[in-house]
Image (tube, grey):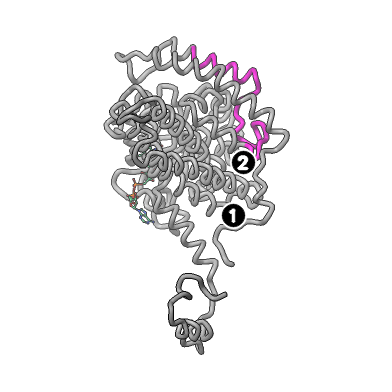
């Protein structure tokens, strides 16, 4: 039967490779042994008077965990070439574990948006661009941001982007406004990849370019943080930024003028489904909290988890987590076997499916906790916000559904309607129905 989700029977072999297994165990152990205690301490050490910075002790804790990860060889494994050479499938198992710890990815230098930016620099950066920006990113010394979205236009269609980059001698002059630029509030963020328009009159897919803009370039004005459900997410932040006559060397252009969409296709690589993999980890965490709470608190003479429809809620959550896990693993495998471009329909399918359902599981875990669920005493409220915003931040759900729907329908292209056929009714079946006086046929079907 035609389908937009291409696969072969081998794609059902979703086992982690033998070589990756010890590595997986090392990562799980590292997260429990080093990251978990470190992050508990890290959050306690925050200075409420300096919300847009880190205290010395916080940096000491985080850098300590990073140094240890490097020493144990658990570093940069998101990059197939530069890192551990993991397949997307093997990486998927690891990312699920990372998703259980807020500082898991960063401790192992695998956090967004740096991963996508590093991937782009690795694939298309010049030797100079790599030396200046990729190397310190790979060493975990600096952080980065990706600036595409603009407040004044629908940015889910990147062809709309209007920030202008105009060539002036050996420089580009950039003017425009961006918002929700994640990570640009972090004092360690030094570089942005900015999507801008270089050929306003060019063909739609050649109008845009991507260019490197150091965040401290004169004319880059951080207007303030955008809020997410009333929180500013300091010190990471999702910043509102204006570019007023920002001048950068022409050599900061990535890949070449008008090649912004080609670069976006590259970002379609592993970075794009890492979020989904981590989301499965978040759903696991939410279900764990849901059951623990429900099983250990009593009301109306029973543990809460046994009241009303709660058992079904738990059962559905577990069943759907497993279904989502299989989908994400299949998407990862499709990337390994078909390549990132061909696997894009799989990628969209999981991006549309996973955060929506994970949001619902976290919401149900919140409900099981009563008021505590929305409080600062559980991670559930911030986990919910994270998953809810993913449904926009990584491209709106609808755009991903559109990609899947288009591919599914395109698989039927060229289908011919048989003109002579006037009725689809099966004559034998119709006759049997007419004979069926006592209606038994309605329930049992023909023998
Ligand atoms: C927390 C957070 C972090 C973010 N981080 C970044 C970042 O680091 N860098 C960055 O550049 N951007 C970032 N974004 C912005 C994000 O990428 C955009 O919000 C997203 O691409 C959608 O663009 P838009 O907001 O302009 O929505 P619009 O394009 O205006 O779309 C609005 C709505 O229209 C509907 N719609 C759009 N297309 C379709 C379609 N094909 N079919 C049906 N309905 C459709 C959907 O309901 C959609 O939600 C972030 C956003 C959030 C909330």
**Disc 1 within 8 angstroms of ligand 1 (CB):** no
Report helix, strand or loop for mark 1: loop
What are the residue bounds of the magenta stretch? 61-90
- Whether the residues at callouts 1 and 2 have beta carbons within 8 Å, the answer is no
Q: Nearer the viewer, residue 133 or 444?
A: 444
Q: Is residue 181 visible?
A: no
**Disc 2 within 8 angstroms of ligand 1 (CB):** no
Total tally of numbered discs in the picture: 2
User: Which residue is tagged 1?
Assistant: 342
Quarter containing the C terminus: bottom right
Residue at image point 58% right, 52% down: 343
Farthest residue in the right direction?
18
Q: Nearer the viewer, mark 1 or mark 2?
A: 2
Q: Is residue 376 visible?
A: yes
Farthest residue in the top direction?
57
Q: Which mark is residue 390?
A: none
User: Which residue is tagged 2?
Assistant: 88
Looking at the image, tell me whether mark 1 or mark 2 is earlier in sequence order: 2
Residue at image point 59% right, 48% down: 330
Farthest residue in the bottom direction?
420
Q: Is residue 76 left or right of residue 401?
A: right
| Pointer 1 local density, CA inside 10 Å: few below 14, some 14–19, many at least 20 | some
Residue at image point 64% right, 52% down: 338
Residue at image point 64% right, 31% down: 83
Q: Residue 376's x, y, as percent?
A: 32, 23
Report helix, strand or loop for mark 2: helix
Q: Nearer the viewer, residue 403 or 82?
A: 403
Quarter containing the N terminus: bottom right
Q: Nearer the viewer, residue 194 or 156?
A: 156
Q: Is residue 347 above or below residue 277?
A: below
Q: Is residue 218 above or below residue 397?
A: above
Q: Is residue 17 left or right of residue 52?
A: right
């Amino acid at each position: 039967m035609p389908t937009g989700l291409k696969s072969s029977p081998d794609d059902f072999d979703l086992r982690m490779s033998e070589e990756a297994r010890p590595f997986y165990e090392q990562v799980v152990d590292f997260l429990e042994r080093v990251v978990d205690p470190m992050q508990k301490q890290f959050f306690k050490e925050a200075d409420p008077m300096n919300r847009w910075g880190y205290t010395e002790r916080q940096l000491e804790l985080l850098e300590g965990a990073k140094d240890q990860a490097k020493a144990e060889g658990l570093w940069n494994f998101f990059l197939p070439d530069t890192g551990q050479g993991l397949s997307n499938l093997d990486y998927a198992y690891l990312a699920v574990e990372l998703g259980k710890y807020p500082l898991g990815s960063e401790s192992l230098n695998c956090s967004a948006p740096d991963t996508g930016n590093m991937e782009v620099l690795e694939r298309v950066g010049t030797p100079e661009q790599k030396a200046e920006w990729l190397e310190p990113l790979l060493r975990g010394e600096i952080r980065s941001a990706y600036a595409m979205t603009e407040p004044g236009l629908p940015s889910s269609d990147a062809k709309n982007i209007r920030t202008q980059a105009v060539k002036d001698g050996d420089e580009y002059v950039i003017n425009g406004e961006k918002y929700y630029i994640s990570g640009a509030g972090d004092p360690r963020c030094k570089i942005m990849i900015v999507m801008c328009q270089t050929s306003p009159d060019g063909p739609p897919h050649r109008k845009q370019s991507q260019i490197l803009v150091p965040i401290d370039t004169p004319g880059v004005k951080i207007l303030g943080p955008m809020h997410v459900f009333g929180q500013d997410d300091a010190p990471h932040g999702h910043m509102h930024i204006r570019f007023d006559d920002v001048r950068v060397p022409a050599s900061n252009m990535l890949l070449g003028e008008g090649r912004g969409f080609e670069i976006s296709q590259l970002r379609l690589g592993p970075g794009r489904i890492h979020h989904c993999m981590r989301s499965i980890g978040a759903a696991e965490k939410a279900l764990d909290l849901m059951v623990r709470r429900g099983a250990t608190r009593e009301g109306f003479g029973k543990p809460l988890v046994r009241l009303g429809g709660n058992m079904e809620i738990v059962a559905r959550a577990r069943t759907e987590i497993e279904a989502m896990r299989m989908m994400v693993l299949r998407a990862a495998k499709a990337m390994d076997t078909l390549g990132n471009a061909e696997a894009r329909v799989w990628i969209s399918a999981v991006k549309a499916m996973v955060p929506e359902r994970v949001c619902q599981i976290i919401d149900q875990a919140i409900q099981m906790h009563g008021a505590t669920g929305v409080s600062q005493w559980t991670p559930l409220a911030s986990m919910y916000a994270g998953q809810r915003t993913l449904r926009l931040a990584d491209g709106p759900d609808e755009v991903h559904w559109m990609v899947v729907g288009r591919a599914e329908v395109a698989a039927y292209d060229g289908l011919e309607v048989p003109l002579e056929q006037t009725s689809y009714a099966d004559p034998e079946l119709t006759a049997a129905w007419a004979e069926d006086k006592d209606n038994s046929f309605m329930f049992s079907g023909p023998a």
